[in-house]
Image: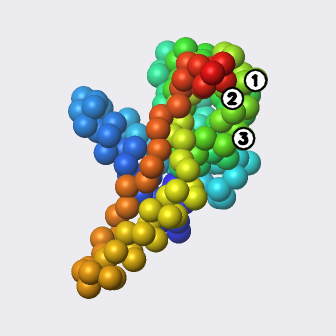
Amino acid sequence: TMSNLTSATEIQNGFYDIFSKRFPELGSDSYVKLEVLSLDGEGQYFSLNNYFGKRDPEMQYVFLTFNDDGSSGIVRYVQEAGMDPERILIGAVGMQSNSRWIFEELPELAPRYYTIAVDYRAMGRQAVKEVNSALAAGEGFSHVVFPYGEIVTADSYRSNETT
């Protein structure tokens, strides 16, 4: 997380909420929330590398990042640590260049990678439209806006490439 970025904190809290509901048997000690230095992959790599000491080869790891750039930091860390791709999952937000790179260039990690494709322009238009509607109606406006997006997997990425 980057506690100084509201959006990063909200995304991270959303990940945690969903995992907690789907896997109630996992206690809070099963989760690590890292404060990262920057939005870019290098900052996120640095935080991962500094936090994790000896890794348990039998452990399942799920890495989540609040942006596409973080994916490159996670991938670099996973590769340098020699982690078994079958024992990890990576989740990200923002189907951009790093996500495409993983799907196209890293066949061993692509099936273990999930991202949410976000149309940032549509999200901006949606937010402006909802604020404008609330102002025109003289109503209060909730700061919560549900963005457009869909989950992209290696399979769905490949099928969109071939169509």
Instruction: Give the side of residue 44 with respect to residue 155, left or right.
Output: right
Identified by mark 1, the residue type is Glu
User: Residue 66 shows which numbered tag?
Assistant: none
Q: Quadrant of the C terminus?
A: top right
Marked residue nearer the N-terminal end (3 or 1)? 3
Q: Is residue 108 above or below residue 103?
A: above
Q: Are marks 1 and 2 in contact (CB under 8 Å)?
A: yes
Q: Nearer the viewer, residue 22 or 129?
A: 129
Residue appearing at x 60%, y 25% in the figure: 160
Pinpoint residue 98: horizontal percent, then vertical percent. 70, 39
Q: CA distance from mark 1 to mark 2?
A: 6 Å
Residue appearing at x 40%, y 44% in the figure: 15
Identified by mark 2, the residue type is Ile
Q: CA distance from mark 3 to mark 2?
A: 9 Å
Pinpoint residue 26: horizontal percent, then vertical percent. 30, 32
Q: Nearer the viewer, residue 36 or 152?
A: 152
Residue pointed to by mark 1 = 105
Residue pointed to by mark 2 = 102
Residue appearing at x 51%, y 40% in the figure: 116
Q: Nearer the viewer, residue 132 or 74?
A: 132
Q: CA distance from mark 3 to mark 1?
A: 11 Å
Residue appearing at x 32%, y 40% in the figure: 18
Q: Residues within 10 Å of mark 3 (few under 14, many from 20)?
A: few
Pinpoint residue 86: horizontal percent, then vertical percent. 55, 14
Q: Residues within 10 Å of mark 1 (few under 14, many from 20)?
A: few
Residue pointed to by mark 3 = 97
Asked whether residue 80 appears in the rendered view, the answer is: yes
Q: Is residue 88 above or below residue 130?
A: above
Instruction: Give the side of residue 115 with respect to residue 143, left or right.
Output: right
Q: Residues within 10 Å of mark 2 (few under 14, many from 20)?
A: many
